[in-house]
Image (cartoon, rainbow, N blue to C red):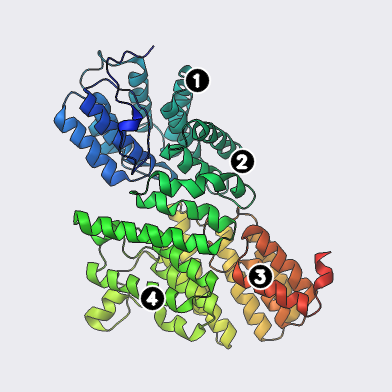
Amino acid sequence: MLRIAIFIPAALLAADVGSISFPVTGTPETRVCFERGVAMLHNFWFEEAREQFQQCTQATPQFAMGYWGVAMTYNHSLWMRVWPEDARAALDKIKDESKLTARERAFIAAARTLFSKTGDKLHREKAYSAAMEKIYLHYPGDFEAATFYALSLLGQVRPGDAGYARQAKAGAIALDVYAKNPNHPGAAHYIIHAFDDPDHAIIALPAARRYAEIAPEAHHARHMPSHIFLQLGMWDDVVKSNESSWAASVAWQKRKGHALSVRDYHSQFWMAYGYLQQGRYADAWKVYEQKKADIIEAQGAGTVYNYFPDLAAAIIFETGEWDKAQTAFNDPVTIRRAGGDDHAHAPAAGRRASEAFTKGMAAAIKGDSPAAWLDLLEQARQIDDQKGAKVSAAAYEARMLMIKAAQAQRAQKADEMTALMQRATQLEEMDKAPSGPPEITKPSHELFGELLLDAGRPKEAAVQFRKSLERQRNRTRSVKGLARALATGGAESGQ
């Protein structure tokens, strides 16, 4: 039994970040403060959650679970980022656990496991998940034990993992909580993450439609539904979701006086990708110009460069404006300072793979040599491999093969183009379908279909476009390519 003298019901919580129940030992005022922090934590609004928990502990220094909350803001499990020293420093402020409930002590012990000095992050995530599973099983009906356990399962997933067991289990747990509390931000959030792929996205559509309404104050909550909308090819909804998220993040940054780097550039990139799928090319370029303006204003500080090369690459590949490839990746800060392009402030070379792929493809299509860009892609692959980046070696090799295939097509070497593209599609299929815009900018099946169409082979092209649409539903260039293939004699390929 939980030993709680007074409990503030979830109905008294502000509805702008969702409604949860997390009984803890403390004053009524502190518990309300704490529950708001936990709701923010579920929305991955880590900065605001930390500030909320710190307000709790400042008001009541002996409030142990407030320090647990601060510690948990230092683990961004699904983004594979963690600050264990900061988390341990917060947990070390818990001096006396004797008056806490057994449940509270279990949550704290699990957090100490998560931020221990033993093993790497994945090892600690697994140990933490095992601890959370015990809490979940011991306290049936405890929605916080359930949702944090579901998140711990998702936190163990890594690129290239075989099977779907962890996601399925996490999704089932989150769906159960969502059915009983449809205003729980963690339940809706983790349902989306669990079913973020083309085959399962439809399961998460009801939660996706509600999540932004559950926690409208949190810009990440406004963005997350677009994961499901994108998987289902619902481009109008993708755009609306990310326009809302981007605007909310800018408003929050200005209101709080934070650095530009806290703006949600993830949503901004997705917004531009949605524009491209809608054929709103001018609007996508406006996003690109806003990105450049932010980089210049921030003088390249923080995370303002995030998605800059990806954004330029996506626009050029979607629009086919290959002549712009030579200037679109120029470093805005360097241009402003010296008129050059040495990328002094740009991300590491590994992140410049998008630039190398785009410029290499532009060269191949125009009949120029892509050799220099193929070399840069190989350098980027080696850097990412050394850093353990999520981009796989297979994805790098697929991009190199695609450039070479375009070059072979230009030289009218049909058999060589076909062999290269067959291998490229095999490599891309080694990775799961992306949970957002294409990881390699241009889906290999889509490019294969376009090259086959240009070679006068519509039946084979239709096969490739269909395969592309299986991995990325309703993607505009694949839809149009399939229509062209069928209109020019490719109908039998779909039988």
* Between discs 1 and 4, the one toward the N terminus: 1
Identity, as a three-letter code, of the amino acid under mark 1: Leu
User: Of helix, strand and loop, which one carries label 1?
Assistant: helix
Q: Residue furthest front?
A: 11
**Separation of marks 3 and 2 at Cα, in angstroms:** 28 Å
Of pointers 4 and 2, the one earlier in the residue sequence: 2
First in residue order: circle 3 vs circle 1: 1
Q: Are marks 4 and 3 in contact (CB under 8 Å)?
A: no
Dot 1 and dot 4 residues touching (CB under 8 Å)? no
Residue 389 seen? yes
Q: Amino acid at mark 3?
A: Val
Callout 4–callout 2 Cβ contact below 8 Å: no
Q: Quadrant of residue 22?
A: top left
The answer to whether 363 appears left or right of 336 in the picture is right
From the viewer's perspective, is the residue at label 1 or at label 4 nearer? 4
- Which element is circle 4 on? helix
Q: Position of residue 201 (x, y in %)?
A: 59, 49
Quadrant for the C terminus, please: bottom right
* Image depth: mark 1 or mark 2 in front: 1
Percent coordinates x, y for residue 393 in the rendering: 55, 58
Mark carried by residue 479? 3
The residue at the point 35 percent across, 23 percent down is 109
Q: CA distance from mark 1 to mark 2?
A: 22 Å
| Residue depicted at 46% across the width and 54% down the height | 389
Spatial distance from mark 1 to mark 4, Cα to Cα?
A: 51 Å
Please name the amino acid that badge 4 sits on. Lys
Decide which of tag 3 and tag 2 comes sooner along the chain. 2
Residue 92 at what x, y percent from top left? Answer: 23, 27
* Residue 165 falls left or right of residue 143: right
Label whose residue precedes the other's in the sequence (1 or 2): 1
